[in-house]
Image: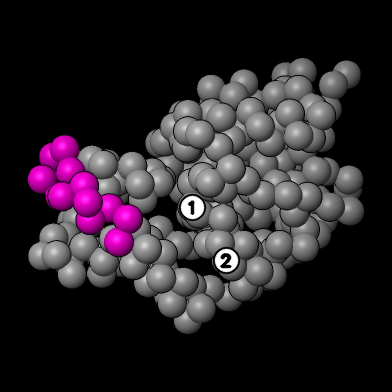
Amino acid sequence: MNKIKAVIFDMDGVLIDAKDWHYEALNQALELFGMQISRYDHLVTFDGLPTKKKLEMLSLERGLPKELHTFINQMKQQYTLEIVNHKCKPKFYHEYALSRLKNLDYKLAVCSNSVRNSVQTMLDKASLIDYMDFYISNQDVNRGKPDPEMYNKAIKRMGLTPKECMIVEDNDHGIMAAKASGAFVMEVETVEDVNYINILKHINQYEAEL
């Protein structure tokens, strides 16, 4: 019988409670030019998308000048890191879960629509980076989520088939990408759902289907 051999995590909203951080940082950058995204639009439309994609959508829908994209993106990343350095702290139940999974020889990775520096900084601040075999950012692929490219890349890098992997995701764009990869998907609503008992329960349920 085949078994699940790897757990691949989204980062924001799964391992790091950073949804509001990205929202706040982007609005801080947009406010320099008199623009904002409402919390409703963030949750319904923008959540989980790369900043580059969000800015492209704002240009199409609200006339944000494209020549401002690079500067706004740079400022957004700077503001994000300031928030991360202030708010990102280890959570015991995440450290415990990853430690137990690692001891059971599961391969572990992160696939995030965030830029590489944000992924590394957040995982480091949360004391989770040492548990990961690797991480993939939106700078490591041509297409971010909802395209499955980064999940396909992670599965291939692990030398596994999709049905030997379980992906943990929280938002519509990420869930769409995870399902398109062919892997099993554990859908969560909050970072508290990402605990050892819950992860193992989903692995056991999916393995019963194999």
Which color scheme did the rendering employ for the protein?
Answer: one colour
**Front residue (pair 123, 96):** 123
Please tell me whether residue 47 is drawn above or below residue 167 in the rendered image: below
Residue 62 falls left or right of residue 110:
left
On-image quarter of the C terminus: top right
- Amino acid under label 2? Met
Disc 2 target residue? 122
Give the percent coordinates (x, y) of residue 136. Answer: 62, 46
Which callout, 2 or 1, points at the residue further toward the start of the chain? 1
Q: Which mark is drawn over residue 114?
A: 1
Q: Which amino acid does label 1 sit on?
A: Ser
Determine the residue positioned at 32% across, 55% down.
70
Describe residue 95's horizontal placement relative to residue 75 as left or right.
right
Estimate the x, y position of residue 166 in percent, counting from the top left.
Answer: 68, 34
Residue 62 falls inside the magenta stretch = yes
Q: Please, which residue is most extreme toward the front here?
A: 67
Whether residue 205 is visible to the viewer of this picture, yes or no, is no
Magenta span of residues: 58-71
Q: Disc 2 vs disc 1: Cβ atoms closer than 8 Å?
A: yes
Q: Answer above or below: position of 18 versus 141.
A: below
